[in-house]
Structures are given as C-alpha cells and as structure tokens.
C-alpha cells in the first residue's frame, strides 16, 4: 500500500518527467522515466521506411511474427520465458515505429536496464536478429528497408550483450 | 624464413589467446552464432574474405565466446591455365584466424609451349594468420570506423629452381597486410580495402622479388559488394600486383563475384575473373568457382 502511494505521488515529487503508466493486460512494472531516448537510437528522418514497412499495421504484423518465431526458437526461448508478452509486443511495436520515423513514442525502458539481468550472448543476440529477418521476409518487407531497421538495432549489441 | 613466420604467429597468439580466454577456463568455448555471410568466404590464399582479397572479418561461425572453422576448395578456369586451391582455417573468438592453403597452378598446353612439359604444375603452400585489431563491421553501424585486422601470410613455392631461373630472388617469403572492412547495412553494402606489403610474383607461384624489383612494395586491394538478400552478396574486386619479373609482364587482378550462403554451414561463390597476363600468356580470364563448409 505504501508503495502504491509513493508511485502515485512520484510525478509530483519529481516535478515533471513522465513516469510509466500501467497498461491493461500488462503486469505492473517498477516506475521509470518515460523518454524516446530509451529507444536506443535516433529515428530515421522522414517516413519512407515506415511506409515501406506498411505503416503501423505492417510493424504490428512483423512484431507478431517475431514473437511467434522467438517462442519456437530453442536457442533463445528460455530468455523470454518470464516475459510479459503483451507488454513486449506493445513496446517493440512502439520502438520500431518510432525508430522508422513513424508517428509513435516509445514508452518502454532503456536497452541496458531491459537486458541487464538476462546474461545475453552475441550468439543469442544474432538468433534474435535472424528471427526478426525471417519475420520481415515473411511479411514481404523489402530487403533494403529491413536493413535500415537492422542498422539502427545492431549497435544496441553493446547494451544488450553482457556475457 | 619459416622460423620467422612461426615467431610472428606465436607473438600474435600470445596477445590474442589470453585476451580472449580471460576469466573463463580455457577449454570452455561455444561453436556457431555468426550471422550468414559475416565470416566471409575463403580467398585464394585461404584467408576469410572475398575471392581474391583478404578481409578484416574472421573465418568460422564462432562469436567472441567460441571457436569455428572452415574448409574450402576453389578453381579458376583461365584461357591457358587452371588454378586449384584447397585449404582449412580456424577462427578463435571472432578475433584471430589461422589458415592453411595449397595452391596448384596447372600450365596445361602452355606448359609444353614454355618448354616445361605438358600439364606442368607450380604449387605453393600458404600459411596465414590474421588478428582483428579494432572496429566492428557488424555491430558498429553507428560508427564510420571499419573493422580493421592485420595479417601475415608465409608462402612457399615448390619450383625453386625454375622460379629462380626466370629471375625471382626467392622461392618463399612473407606478405603482410592490413584490411579494413565495413558492412554498411543502411545501404546494404559491404566494402573492403586492403594494403599489402609484398614481393610475390603471381601470388608467389612464380617466386618472390625479381630482376625488375627485388624488394617488397605496397599494393592496394579493394572489394565492394551489395547485399541482395541475407544470403546473397554480389560485387567486384580489384587487386593491384607488383611487376617484378623481366621475362613476363604481371597485371592486376579483377573479378566480378556472387557469394551465396546456402545455410549457416555451406557457402558457394562464382565469379568472372580477369588475371591479365601470366608468364607471357595474355588475357587470362575465366570462371572462378568455390565452395566453403564451416561451423
């Protein structure tokens, strides 16, 4: 009860920065400051690549397939076993939409704090890249547009891989 | 000469292995994990790279936590000659690479014309070592810094008397090179530039140094390719060569290639290669094919 009280008061006490809100269907998360900087890269200028992905709907389809691929991939499925899939799907869509120049804000946590406890290796990082490539291929995203997204995600290796 | 190579290889190993194996006990390593095509194919000297140019990428499917290996064979069917190569290479922790290649140069009918005999062959062993120094071709997409590696190749040609008779100073020698490789994902490009310090005549098959130029010179080598799918890279390479021997002009090498990763283990490549004039036979062009298997 005390914790909830302080949670509600936090925006007032901190005097401004937006804190994460609870979303329906998602498990509660510890408070953190919401910022597009948490997305881990600067977004593309212009919406050309966002359009090539088929806009918000296209990104949602890619992320849905990505999650199906991850859940079937014995190399990395265990890392995600305790994940809140509803929240993961929402924040991934937000992140891709924001990075590709779409009209979205990223409300998830930053790349370091999301991954720090998972002990992820380069091979596991690459397995996720492969699953994303397969998802984009299956959704008919043009190869050059796929690589525009991967070019933004690749440097996150530094924050994601800790082992 | 071999002892100099082993000494240099030992020096490189003494830097690379402790850094890669720190904290962990030595026998613990993983295999696999690299993305398709990011180990390169095997160049004509056995190094991870393109077809004729060594790249800064490290061979094998291993990541920084593992060990990988590749084996390959290639053939170039030129107008008057055939070049066959085969070799093996090991990649340690995506940091260090050791390779061995055997090159076989078949003179076919030209052997008789040159007075050497029908199907006379020149052969050569190439022992290579490559150490990745800095930069990250795959994950450094937010940086202009390429991945940079330094390599050495000890080459030992087998026709000692003949290569000396045509003017070569030596039948074995060391090439030293620096390669810079950048995978520009945002533009789906793979770019490489290599600077080689060498006195090899026709890659060493015709010996080292000559009556026109006895010493090593700096030679530039370039590769550029475009990724068409995550399995297919097409591009071109240009490799400047020294021209050390008076008896025959030596030209630069050039190729247009396609490299295809069938799966994580097997890659194939095909190219149109133009190796110019070789041993007084001009316009040596033809099809290059290679297959590489690895883990």
Image (spheres, coloured by chain):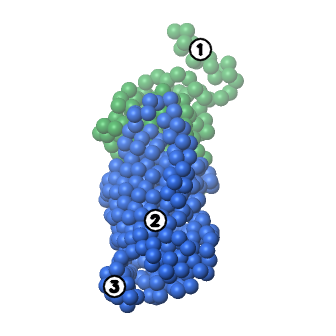
Chain colours: A green, B blue
Q: Position of residue A50 (x, y in %)?
A: 50, 54
Residue contact at pointers 1 and 3, CB within 8 angstroms = no
Query: In the image, what residue occupies the spot 57% across and 70% down?
Result: B199
Judging from the image, mark 3 belongs to the subunit labelled B
Foreground residue among A117 and B166: B166
Query: Residue B51 is drawn in which quadrant?
Result: bottom left
Same chain letter for marks 1 and 3: no
Residue located beneath label 2 in the image: B156
Residue B192 appears in the figure: no
| A79, above or below A10, in the image | below
Depth check: give the residue in front, B101 or B142: B101
Q: Chain of mark 1?
A: A
x 40%, y 29%: residue:
A83
Residue ID at (42%, 82%): B285
**What separation in Å lies between label 2 and label 1 (alpha carbons)?**
75 Å
Residue at horizontal 35 percent and vertical 88 percent from the top: B112
Say left or right for A97 vs A68: right
Residue denoted by label 3: B117
Give the residue furthest to the right. A15
Judged from the image, the secondary structure of the residue bearing numbered disc 3 is loop
Location of mark 1 (residue): A6
Which mark lies nearer to you, 1 or 3? 3
Image quadrant assignment for residue B118: bottom left
- Which disc number belongs to residue B104? none
Using the numbered discs, state the Cα–Cα distance from disc 1 to disc 3 in whole angstroms. 92 Å
Secondary element type, mark 2: strand
């Amino acid at each position: 009860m005390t914790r909830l009280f302080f949670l509600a008061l936090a925006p007032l006490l901190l005097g401004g920065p937006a804190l994460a809100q609870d979303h329906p269907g998602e498990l509660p998360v510890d408070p953190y400051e919401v910022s597009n900087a948490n997305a881990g890269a600067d977004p593309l200028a212009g919406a050309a690549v966002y359009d090539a992905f088929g806009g918000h709907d296209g990104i949602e389809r890619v992320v849905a397939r990505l999650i199906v691929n991850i859940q079937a991939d014995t190399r990395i499925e265990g890392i995600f076993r305790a994940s809140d899939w509803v929240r993961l799907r929402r924040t991934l869509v937000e992140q891709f939409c924001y990075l590709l120049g779409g009209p979205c804000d990223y409300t998830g946590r930053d790349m370091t704090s999301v991954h720090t406890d998972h002990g992820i290796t380069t091979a596991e990082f690459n397995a996720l890249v492969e699953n994303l490539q397969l998802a984009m291929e299956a959704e008919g995203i043009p190869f050059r547009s796929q690589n525009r997204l991967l070019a933004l995600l690749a440097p996150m290796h530094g924050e994601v891989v800790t082992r | 000469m071999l002892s100099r190579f082993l000494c240099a290889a030992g020096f490189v190993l003494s830097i690379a292995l402790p850094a890669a194996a720190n904290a962990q006990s030595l026998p613990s390593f993983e295999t696999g994990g690299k993305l398709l095509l990011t180990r390169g194919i095997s160049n004509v000297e056995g190094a991870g790279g393109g077809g004729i140019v060594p790249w800064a990428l490290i061979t094998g499917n291993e990541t920084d936590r593992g060990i990988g290996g590749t084996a390959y064979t290639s053939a170039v069917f030129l107008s008057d000659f055939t070049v066959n190569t085969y070799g093996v290479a090991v990649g340690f922790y995506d940091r260090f690479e050791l390779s061995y290649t055997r090159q076989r140069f078949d003179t076919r009918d030209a052997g008789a014309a040159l007075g050497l005999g029908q199907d006379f062959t020149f052969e050569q062993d190439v022992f290579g070592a490559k150490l990745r120094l800095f930069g990250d071709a795959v994950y450094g997409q937010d940086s202009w810094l390429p991945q940079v590696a330094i390599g050495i190749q000890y080459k030992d040609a087998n026709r000692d008397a003949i290569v000396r008779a045509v003017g070569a100073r030596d039948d074995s020698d060391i090439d030293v090179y620096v390669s810079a490789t950048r995978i520009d994902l945002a533009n789906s490009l793979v770019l490489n530039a290599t600077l080689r310090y060498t006195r090899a005549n026709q890659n060493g098959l015709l010996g080292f140094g000559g009556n026109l130029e006895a010493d090593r010179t700096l030679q530039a080598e370039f590769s550029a390719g475009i990724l068409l799918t995550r399995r297919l890279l097409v591009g071109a390479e240009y490799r400047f060569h020294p021209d050390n021997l008076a008896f025959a002009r030596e030209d630069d090498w050039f190729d247009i290639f396609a490299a295809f990763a069938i799966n994580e283990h097997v890659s194939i490549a095909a190219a149109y290669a133009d190796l110019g004039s070789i041993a007084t036979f001009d316009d040596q062009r033809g099809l290059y094919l290679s297959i590489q298997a690895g883990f």
